């Protein structure tokens, strides 16, 4: 392993020490490091595309073998963190986040099927927002709550049914 490869690997370990990452995030980070290394290291002025890709592949392979990168587990953690808490996100927003992080469509589909209960999350958020908007302006409360739920990534039908179920219980 060359000095550049070991330097990159050490930096990636530190990067993974902060939180778990996807393969694409690691790949983008290595590209950024190589640009910095090229800037600071006068002995090697430019890395060719093939050299960059070779370093990226070697580093990612090593991290996968050490089980420090696992896109499926990473997707599960992202879904879990986005659906729990005080202000959960809907399926659409979570999909977009996972696509942006470079997760494969099949992994996204499988993880979303096993983890998400959009109806309960939408109902919880709708209850909170509807109560807030009813105090301010009862005429537009349902409309504003619907917009809020859709902006959080919930499907339109899910948002409507959540609002209707709360409106019928009050």
Image: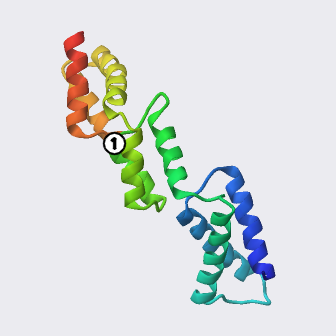
- Quadrant where the image shows the C terminus: top left
Please identify the quarter of the rendering in which residue 34 is found: bottom right
Which residue is farthest front? 65
Mark 1 element type: loop
Give the residue at mark 1: 153
Q: Is residue 140 above or below residue 75?
A: above
Across and down, in percent, residue 15 comes to 69, 58
Toward the viewer: 40 or 78? 78
Label 1 Cα neighbours within 10 Å, binned few <14 / some 14-19 / many ≥20: many
- Residue at 28% x, 39% y: name it: 150
Instruction: Specify whether 3 is left or right of 137.
Output: right
Q: Is residue 115 left or right of residue 39?
A: left
Give the x, y percent position of residue 112.
38, 45
Between 131 and 81, which is closer to the camera in this rendering? Answer: 81
**Would residue 13 be found to the left or right of residue 130 on screen?**
right
Q: Nearer the viewer, residue 66 or 167?
A: 66
**Residue 95 position within the rendered picture, expressed as x and y whole percent measured from the top left:** 38, 51
Tell me which residue sits at (26%, 30%) in the image.
Answer: 144
56 versus 116 height, above or below: below
Position of residue 122 relative to residue 49, above or below, is above
Residue at horizontal 36%, vertical 44%? Answer: 113
- Which one is nearer the viewer's eye here, 55 or 48? 55
* Residue at the limit of the structure toward the top, as seen here: 170
> In the rendered image of this protein, does residue 57 appear above or below residue 89?
below
Instruction: Say which quadrant the N terminus sits in.
Output: bottom right
Q: Residue at x 24, y 34 (%)?
A: 158
The colour scheme is: rainbow
């Amino acid at each position: 392993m060359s000095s550049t490869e070991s330097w990159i690997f050490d930096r990636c370990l530190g990067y993974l020490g902060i939180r778990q990452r996807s393969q694409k995030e690691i790949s983008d980070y290595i590209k950024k490091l190589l640009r910095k290394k090229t800037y600071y290291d006068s002995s090697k002025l430019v890395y060719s595309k093939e050299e960059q890709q070779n370093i990226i592949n070697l580093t990612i392979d090593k991290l996968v073998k050490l089980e420090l990168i696992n896109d499926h587990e990473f997707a599960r953690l992202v879904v879990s963190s986005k659906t729990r808490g005080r202000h959960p996100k809907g399926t659409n927003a979570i999909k977009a986040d996972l696509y942006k992080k470079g997760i494969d469509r099949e992994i996204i589909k499988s993880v979303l099927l096993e983890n998400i209960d959009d109806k309960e999350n939408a109902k919880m958020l709708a209850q909170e927002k509807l109560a807030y908007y009813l105090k301010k302006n009862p005429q537009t409360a349902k409309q504003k709550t619907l917009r809020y739920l859709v902006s959080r990534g919930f499907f339109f039908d899910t948002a409507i049914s959540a609002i209707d179920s709360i409106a019928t219980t009050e």
